Image (spheres, rainbow, N blue to C red):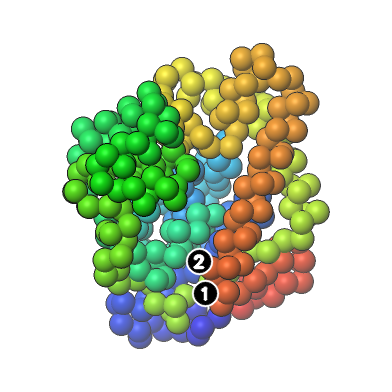
Amino acid sequence: MDGSLNDEDDTPATARRAILIAGPTASGKSALALSLAKRLNGVIINADSMQLYEDLRLVSARPSAAEEAEVPHRLYGVLPASTAFSTGAWLRLAEQELGAAWASGQMPILVGGTGLYFKGLTEGFAEMPDIPQEIRNRARAIADDEGVEGLKQRLISEGDPASAETLADPQRLARSLEVLLATGRSLKAWQQEAQSSPLLAPQACHRIVLAPPRPWLHERIEQRARLMVSEEGLREVRELLAKDLSEKLPAMRAIGVPELGGYLAGESDCAETIHRLTVATRQYAKRQETWFRNQMTDWQRVDPSNRIEMEALLRTN
């Protein structure tokens, strides 16, 4: 901890205190945030890109309604699945919630698994231009109709061959194309602009990464997979699929949506669906852990399976 969270707040507005909790999926971030919020008069602010969507409570492992009623929760379930949301847009919402928490004398506790959100909070973020919805729709239509190769060809013809050569993910390609179409400049050019100032000063934050042992995390991931193949999880995905949204949208690509969609379509049985969910979630958790290990080298690492470590963490806050 860079300073005590319980001291009188005599820091300037730009260095007001906050707790940041990152970690791989199923590592116990939400439970830790809830415990800290109860002790510290805290407000929990979501920093997970999938938990923003109102359609995905169980699939994204959002806090339950009962948990949300215990302490204030912000930025959970605030977007329809039809929305594609950027890191910059999240930072603007997070800035509002941080200000509201400080103004009310509450401790903001930001929790989630989206590394870019935390990086933007503490290091600043290159400001992206607002993209007109018409252009967003054009780019998404190209992604739907022409796929990855169509997006690459359009980027090349519009003057951004570098993105076409280096990117393979359809969402990132579509994002690059919409920025290019809207501004006449490549996404990389915008990203090289001077970054905005960070919203949080590192010395004013307690920055925590949950780093569980692999077997412990894998067991929890399998438990979550089994929970997802429940009537509630199936209903959630059934209702989402009924909206007939583009498969390229982030919410439609959330772990659980394709897998449960396959189960509902008769493409897999329950056991196979649980296996697919478990494998996909393990792979995602591994990518998250790699990000945290490489990008958050100076964050405090805590083993959530170690009760002594967790109790010590709670005592010091």
Determine whether label 2 and label 1 are within 8 Å by CB.
yes
Left or right: residue 284 compared with residue 308: left
Extreme-top residue of the structure: 266
Rendered image quadrant of residue 238: top right
Q: Secondary structure at mark 2?
A: strand
Q: Nearer the viewer, residue 172 or 59?
A: 172
Label 2 crowd (10 A; few <14 / some 14-19 / many >=20): many
Q: Quadrant of the N terminus?
A: bottom right
Q: Secondary structure at mark 1?
A: strand
Label 1 crowd (10 A; few <14 / some 14-19 / many >=20): many
235 w.r.t. 90: above or below:
above
Residue receiving disc 1: 206
Counting from the top left corner in percent of width and height, residue 159 is at 25, 46
For the question of whether residue 95 can be seen, the reply is no
Q: Earlier in the sequence, mark 2 or mark 1?
A: 2
Left or right: residue 13 compared with residue 72: left
Which residue shows up at 67% across the image and 17% down it? 267
183 w.r.t. 38: above or below:
above
Rendered image quadrant of residue 279: top right
Which residue shows up at 58% across the image and 74% down it? 297
Residue receiving disc 2: 20
145 w.r.t. 45: above or below:
above
Counting from the top left corner in percent of width and height, residue 24 is at 62, 55
Q: Quadrant of the C terminus?
A: bottom right
Counting from the top left corner in percent of width and height, residue 41 is at 47, 65
Counting from the top left corner in percent of width and height, residue 137 is at 28, 31
For the question of whether residue 282 can be seen, the reply is yes
Residue type, mark 1 in image: His
Which residue shows up at 66% across the image and 40% down it? 280
Residue type, mark 2 in image: Leu
Q: Nearer the viewer, residue 157 or 266?
A: 157
Which residue shows up at 61% across the image and 78% down it? 316
